[in-house]
Amino acid sequence: MATAAEEEASRPFAGLSDVSISEDIAVEGDISVPVGPSARRDDEFSTLDEPVKETVLRDLRAVGKKFVHVLYPKRSSALLRDWDLWGPLLLCVTLALLLQGGAADSDYQGGPQFAEVFVIVWFGSIIITLNSKLLGGTISFFQSLCVLGYCILPLTAAMAVCRIVLVAGSGAVSFAVRLVVVTASFGWSTFASTAFLADSQPTNRKALVVYPVFLFYFVIGWMVLTFSPSQ
Amino acid sequence: MASPHDLHFQEFEEAAELLSADPGASTLSMSASNPINTAGAAPGEDVKLDLSEDEEGQEESSELLGGQKAAGGFWTFEYYQSFFDVDTVQVLDRVKGSVMPLPGRNFIKHHLRSNPDLYGPFWICVTLVFSVVISGNLSSFLSEMGNPSYHYRPQFHRVTIAAVVIFLYAWLVPVALWGFLSWRQGSERQVGGYTFLETVCVYGYSLFIYIPTSVLWIIPFEWLHWTLILVAMVVSGSVLVLTFWPVVRDDTKVMSVATVVTILVLHTLLAVGCKMYFFHTEVHVPTAAPTSPPLHVTVATRAH
């Protein structure tokens, strides 16, 4: 019995005596548990190894998708959910560049400078966003900036059209054409942005939020319409 | 040792029972003792009665207090949200009150009703800036239409100038006026004095009449311009005078008249200054031009 007890006592440690660390158990290797056949869980989130072209294209595709949303404004939340500010920056730079080169007899008395366009677009968007949040809106700061910036797309397109029309001539006909194009795109911009923004406001304050948006696109439309090329 | 412990335990159970019986009942810690004593026939109802009475009492007293409803410190967002606590209908009502001043109605007492907002003053100023600049641009374009050497310019630098002037007027003058009135009133600050926000609010809404006036200034008749300025100044000035006269008339005769006159003079300066700077119609306005439709751009400017 003593030997059996001794054996029992030694049995829990029996396996241990067989262990030799240096041979059986490797202490190197990775601790991550492979989920799929060949992919590690990290691959979905690590974009460090992909080619640059793919990174750029992915962002461009996201921007392009939002452009389509602006052109056909349905009540979708895609624009709001994945906000980004690349599109607004792109549109603002394009608009500011297109507004250059006009009426440059003297810089004084001319059209808006490059920096003025930037200031009006970005500070205007920020002030409208603050206004909407102060009135009790539920939209977040950057989502609102994103929407307002993307909805400048119709006006930028109108600016491009206006410059093309101005190349053809700057008489009364060209002015009438430009007026129609700018008015239509101004209405489109306002309609598109209110389709996204107005939902986030309580009903009795919707007009208070929509009016500054109307004013914002009106001023940008005015800048587009009054662009007069240098002689 | 057992009874106070038991009582404590019992209290908790009773409150929990009440809450499970009626989960919708709001709970107040201070009235927790009452349901325990009356925990007989209808504890849930008692709790509700107690609480609703309490809530109504609280609401009434807060309305009576009136005054500023600023919530939180000035570094929190809610503090500024309390200045934008207006609905569309209220803003429209205040705008209407600013263009139709009736002799009995003090704008602040009648329209603001201790809920001054910053939405109106701010957006009216912004709109006024752009309406003055755009109308000025249009009016100078129209008046120079017959001039072959005229080349249209958007004149965007005027936006900066207009913005600085109008915002300085709409925000600095109320500061100065409020400071002056508070100083003159001295110890009677609570009675009849206006808060800073109310002063800014009145000034902001009183500028509204200039927006349609500036749009109408596009029509290039000089006599029309001066008539419109007169009408606008009368309306806007009377809003201001009706608001500030009751506060000022308790002062000495000289000071009260001087204050009112200063208010009116500053207001006039703004209107006339805007007109002179943004709308200087040239002397050689061609007589046929005002009646021609505005869209005819003369081709002569592009002739080579």
Image (cartoon, coloured by chain):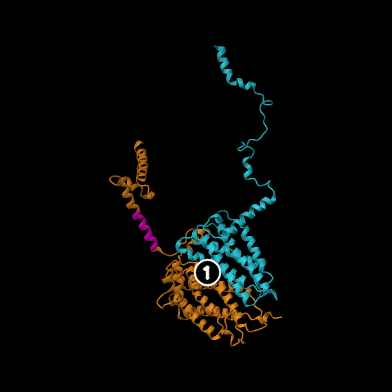
- B265 in magenta: no
| Tint applied to chain A in the drawing | cyan
Q: What residue lies at 59% left-to-right and 58% top-to-bottom?
A: A68
Q: In the drawing, does residue B115 fall left or right of residue A167?
A: left
Q: Residue furthest top?
A: A1
Residue type at the position of mark 1? Trp
Q: Is residue B28 above or below residue A28?
A: below
Residue B224 can be seen in this image: yes
Quarter of image, res B97: bottom left
Q: Is residue B297 above or below residue B23?
A: below
Q: Which chain is orange?
A: B
Circle 1 — which element?
A: helix
The x and y percentages for residue B11 are: 35, 42
The boundaries of the magenta stretch are B52-63
Q: Which residue is mark 1?
A: B123
Q: What residue lies at 55% left-to-right and 65% top-to-bottom?
A: A188
Residue B193 can be seen in this image: no
